[in-house]
Image (tube, grey):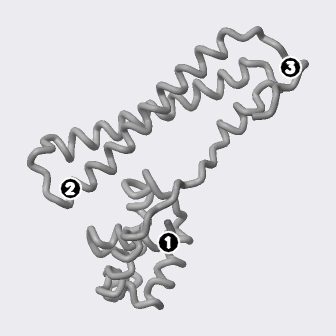
Amino acid sequence: MALSHAILVALLESPSSGYDLAKRFDGSVGFFWDASHQQIYRELAKLEQAHHITVETIEQAGRPNKKNYFITERGKVFLTDWMAVPSSLSPLKDDLLVKLFGGYLVNPAVILKELRHHRKLHQTRLVEYQAIEERFFPDVETLSSTAVYQYLTLRNGIQFEQGWLKWCDEAISTLQTLPSLAIADDLPPSC
């Protein structure tokens, strides 16, 4: 997936200024797609050039003019064509897993500390997701068709965090049984 797709999906929900769009990426969209404000503004320019979005300039007294971006029909076709193409698995890039894979080089306490830290982060995110679920999706049976898709996205996030917590607990439990060695003498066989 490209950032352009994430922006177009966000604009489907509601037209936005670049600033407002960047704020949405810091919040809801940011839970599943990370982008800096600079990246978003660069991509908006490309999408406008490709006629996938249009911009409406709103004059503001005493402040710079505001640009509101709207998805065009051409943008919707671009998006629906992309949605029809099967997605591949996203590559996993995770510092914690790299540290864990080479964790035999340090005392297990170092990795245990990192695992506990990540467990707290995932627990915090899970609580955030559950609060969103409770606030915006209290009755799944009455959701609009738009809300059903947003709800399913949220449920993926909840289950993702629950999976991480379960795995963190398993990893912590396993490492707590290891002897406290400063550095392993033997290298494990490669996987």
Q: CA distance from mark 1 to mark 3?
A: 45 Å
Looking at the image, is mark 1 or mark 3 nearer the viewer?
3
Mark 2 neighbour density, 10 Å: few (under 14) some (14–19) many (20 or more): some
Looking at the picture, which amino acid does disc 2 mark? Ala
| Circle 1 Cα neighbour tier, 10 Å, few/some/many (<14 / 14–19 / ≥20) | many
Q: Amino acid at mark 1?
A: Ile
Left or right position of 174 against 102: left
Q: Which mark is residue 129?
A: none
Q: Which circle marks residue 147 in the picture?
A: 2
Using the numbered discs, state the Cα–Cα distance from disc 2 to disc 1 in whole angstroms. 25 Å
Q: Which residue is mark 3?
A: 184
Q: Is residue 53 above or below residue 10?
A: below
Residue 19 visible to the viewer: no
**Disc on the earlier residue, 2 or 1:** 1
**Pointer 1 residue:** 40
Amino acid found under the numbered disc labelled 3: Ala
Q: Residue at x 26, y 71 (%)?
A: 14
Q: Nearer the viewer, residue 38 or 188?
A: 188
Seen in the picture, residue 93 relative to 106 is either above or below; the reply is below
The crowding category of the residue bearing disc 3, from other C-alpha atoms within 10 Å (few below 14, some 14 to 19, many at least 20), is some
Q: How many marks?
A: 3
- Tell me the SS state at disc 2: helix
Report x, y in % for residue 76. Answer: 32, 80
User: Given this view, does label 2 or label 1 mark the residue nearer the observer?
Assistant: 2
- Residue at the extreme left of the image, as rendered: 142
Instruction: Kindly tell me whether residue 25 is visible in this rendering.
Output: yes
Q: Is residue 74 above or below residue 4?
A: below
Q: Quadrant of the C terminus?
A: top right
CB within 8 Å, label 2 to label 3: no
